[in-house]
Image (cartoon, coloured by chain):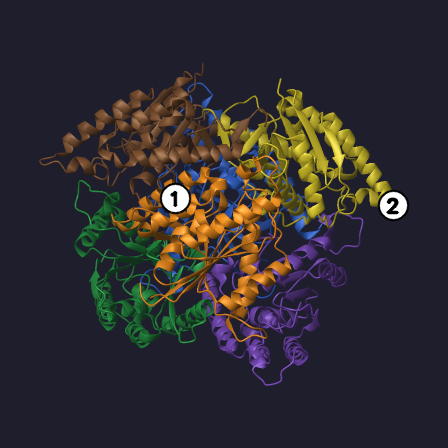
Chain colours: A yellow, B brown, C purple, D blue, E orange, F green
């Protein structure tokens, strides 16, 4: 049984579903612990369907988004923690960074996942990246004993953005999510406010599965998720 | 016990020692099989000490280099196979590529290591890279059934060059070679014609060990070797 | 007749003249509408000639710069709107971004032009870029119905900086400004505080014209301006 | 009616179908002329299904591939011309380059499409790129009158490879292929030897359509193809 | 005798020692003037050894770090000026930038050294880079007479970070520090709180010396330091 | 007096004039020695004006180009040595590389100048780069005593191409050519077959002069040439 802890931080409450639900499910199905942090509910910029309802309010949108994300997290075995910082624009200033750092010191994750550094289509994703990267460094204290509470350094990866090449994303890791793909499908189904993305990311998982088959020759892989590791991976052998 | 096969291809007979002897020793000490191919003996461009001896001949230089490399390979548990194509310049044309491809079809390596694509200090390293990359693709047949004999796709990494930044090398994997470092030291000692590099790569292993400690916080790591993976790594979980 | 709306945002009041006056004139001469926003007057860092006058004041410099930029805008058929945020350093914080976003929601531009992301010679150009990029995204709401007022996504290009390679600028579009080059010359002549740049950008237009001729073989092109498109261009056919 | 001529060069006879059939169909449906050159039939490396048949021969594989590609080209209104240079490896030496150059001088294309410069999964795609780029330059004579027969400079774009990020491909143009998507589907159906790719590229067209919608906000776009322009685009206005 | 002035800005009080002590000593030994600014004492994140002492306080850590850095600066002939802005995180906002700019206007350095723009292992180094780059530009006024006090443009270089490739650092200048290496060793010895780095940077100087020998063939070079110049170097002849 | 030797290698006989005549003149006016090698006369691709004359022959074009280049070289104090390998395409195979290497061993240059590695507008420039880079490495023998005749390592720079950004050229050195600019103008005037480039490169020298002024604040600089250094510069002090 794995005892690894995984922290997934998204700018909006649904980000973890499209981009990492498979890797989370794979992680928890092996006994690992997973915590999903949503810096905002995406209530303004990513809840278009909900705003079409007459009399809709921001509070109600947030409530619905909270329920959806909680359910999706539960489906893949993760805990869900919202920061509710607001979106479009997400402003993750020093207080948010410190809150994230404290959470990292408590949770002591082995692996941290978040958005890539660049995204020309979304103002909040790079803001989330910057906050997570900053908090992670404030947690690890340069790898030496420090004048503040620390946690061991974690692996740091970014998940796949919507238009990868334009976000300067190059995959370095494919996670085979074949055995848990039904969990990802179910988690996506919980995000009723963004139904149009479900087919998109279902196809995307197939395509990354194709890529992973090509790399390995392993015909058993049907679906995969792509990640980019930002720091070298330390291994015992190749 | 590992049953993985590792293929290491160097432009000159000593390249594998400085750049990958630790990873090879780690691999074989777990039961893996390792085959080192030297495209040339480096008899012209990397055997300066030997040429200082009066009456030295190319044949004798090659003989000495063969003995040294064979011994070093043996120290880290690998088999040594020289192609003797000549160096400065190394010309690895279609025939050499086909010979490499046939060797790959027979050996069916799980992992292939060679030089990076660029090296502004050495004309033979990029030539070796190009030949290995080409041969590897001719072996794997696009990942589908092909009109020729194939081997399963292999992992493909490049090892650390002498001046990494100028060779556009960015490490993505550190291999912890602490348990086998004495083997690397012994293998380096076998390369009498390039004694001046032994201290250099001993220090380099210490520094990469420092980097790997920084990434992991694992104070047990003392020495490491750096590699760059050219294709995504397919994993079951993060 | 074109009904396209073009928004040009410069850090200082003269930037649009050197870098985009030709493209603006070409746009308006086809019936398009153009709006030039100057985030500052460049009163401190780019008005050296004016400060040589005894007794010069900041207010007077701004007044002169306003007149010059208004005249230049008028020459190329554009409206001029100064934000007067101050320069060296230009600080374009959340309020300035929101003001830009509101302007974009009202004006609903089809194409937005501003400075590149990097400029090692100027502290204000990257600040302008960041503000424009952020405002543009806050305006477009991720391409879906949003919880706030939006405008359709616009094309997004950056104009040529003073030392292109060092600003990581690579041209992807040359606009043939031959038919309106006299307008650009006249607009440049209006910028009395920076006369030394007129010859420079006159030559630059000739050189980009040479480049555009080389790309097309069209000997009728005499002057051009260079731009870099940050997002893919969607076309009906190649 | 368009009178533009488009030249599409693929390493193997099916490449144009997966990567550019939509753009070709869009081009010809407007009256443009299209010529598809296949440097090889892909008889060894990309005809796996055919080699599963007992008693299969290289000649027969080529014959079938010729029929399939001819039919697919016909479906999108293009002429098909095979060079039959052999694949895995494709060797496009000086003679092949000169043959391509002569063809370009005769056909005088307005736009040339081929593979990207890099592809870590395929040895033949970069070889095709190099030959096309070289031939194109030998045709255009540096943009000035030359001591040999020339054709006007053409636009030069590369089409989408199978794993874009790893081929260093970044889209700069999306062609809306919605009106001709049925033609692309029919062309793909003609490639019986690679049926497994039909669903893949059908999905890919949907995803690029999604990307193109995001860039433009135009909900009428359903499918698109992605291209990267290697030289600046010269336009009359933005 | 040189009359050049060198400004070295580090995020923490010891940074200048590891990364530039040799270049400083070389500079001052030729008669040049050197000023070291430490934006913080590194009291929280880089003083682990000191925090192991029972009853340790932040004030005492700062006091010790001040003494160490003053001594090290003195050893290499430089003046030491601490800004004491705090570390982990270092926050170098508008006031700190203005303070740096004023210092630059007074000191009028010919060359400025600081950290690279990126560092995935340290949150403070990029913050220091941004502040220095901004202050330098606010000092030089775009190279023309400005509405504020200026200093002549300075050369701008970044020094070597701990894991160069991952900080996107590529050396463009090696400074031969052989004649002053004993001074660097003595300066490093003064940094008692980070003893573990002394051997690391002693080895690093040897390795960069090896690289500089390779570039020049000058066997007299034993130790060197690596820098990356961010702006072109203007010379009278090659 | 300088005793440095400079080797300039161009693909065509006029390349050295447009791109490096100023740096050569500066070099020789200080007492340095300069040797210009032209791999071809550019008789096919860059002699358009000459081919407009009725009855023109290749031999006559070469003769004229030889005279022009000899005269231009003489104007800037350099010796001219043509290899006459033919152009469009220039094929610089093993024999040409060995001839260059022998020349380098004899001449033992301190600095080598040639074209950049990439040029999407010219097939011969990258071929020249590859040959020079290869020959230079075959000459220097990895910086150690070798089994063949060597010369000391040389500085290696590329000169400015026609469309810098698209050739991935980023200047790292500006040479102030103000004192010898009249010599460059005279050398350019000697290239009668490419008169259209004289004004272009006259303007370019002014612009690079502007850039060099901006970098240094030295108003005495009027004209400059831009170069990119491919290997670190080893210096005694910054």
Q: Which residue is farthest left?
A: B55
Cα distance between the residues tagged 2 and 1: 56 Å
Cβ–Cβ below 8 Å for labels 2 and 1? Answer: no
- Observer-nearest residue: B16 or E190? E190
Residue that numbered label 2 is attached to: A57
Vertical placement of E49 versus E228: above or below? above
Image quarter of residue F146: top left
Image quarter of residue F42: bottom left
Q: Chain of mark 1?
A: B
Q: Please tell me which residue is depicted at 75% across the width and 30% down the height of the picture.
A: A72
Q: Which residue is farthest right?
A: A55
Vertical placement of E180 versus C107: above or below? above
Residue that numbered label 1 is attached to: B167
State which quarter of the image contains the N terminus of chain A: top right
State which quarter of the image contains the C terminus of chain A: top left
Circle count: 2
Vertical placement of E208 versus F41: above or below? above
Query: In the rendered view, does E214 fall on the left or right side of A177?
Result: left
Q: Position of residue D94 (x, y in %)?
A: 31, 46
Q: Which residue is farthest top?
A: B1
Q: Position of residue E145 (x, y in %)?
A: 53, 76
Judge the density around disc 1: few (<14), some (14-19), many (≥20) Cα neighbours within 10 Å: many
**Element type at mark 1:** helix
Vertical placement of F188 versus B174: above or below? below
């Amino acid at each position: 049984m794995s005892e690894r802890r995984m922290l997934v931080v998204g700018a909006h409450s649904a980000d973890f579903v499209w981009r990492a639900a498979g890797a989370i499910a794979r992680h928890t199905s092996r006994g690992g612990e997973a915590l999903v942090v949503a810096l905002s509910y995406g209530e303004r910029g990513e809840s278009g369907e909900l705003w079409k309802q007459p009399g809709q309010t921001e509070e109600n949108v947030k409530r619905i988004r909270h329920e959806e994300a909680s359910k999706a997290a539960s489906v893949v075995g993760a805990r869900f923690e919202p920061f509710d910082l607001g979106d479009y624009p997400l402003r993750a200033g020093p207080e948010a960074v410190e809150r994230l750092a404290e959470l990292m010191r408590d949770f002591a994750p082995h692996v941290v996942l978040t958005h890539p550094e660049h995204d020309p289509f979304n103002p909040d994703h790079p803001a989330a990246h910057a906050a997570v990267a900053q908090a992670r460094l404030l947690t690890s204290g340069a790898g030496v004993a420090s004048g503040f509470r620390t946690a061991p350094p974690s692996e740091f990866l970014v998940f796949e953005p919507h238009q990868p090449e334009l976000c300067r994303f190059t995959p370095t890791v494919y996670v085979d999510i074949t055995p848990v793909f039904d969990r990802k499908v179910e988690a996506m189904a919980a995000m009723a406010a963004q139904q149009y993305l479900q087919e998109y990311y279902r196809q995307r998982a197939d395509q990354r599965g194709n890529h992973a088959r090509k790399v390995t020759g392993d015909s058993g892989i049907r679906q995969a998720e792509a990640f980019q590791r930002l720091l070298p991976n330390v291994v015992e052998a190749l």
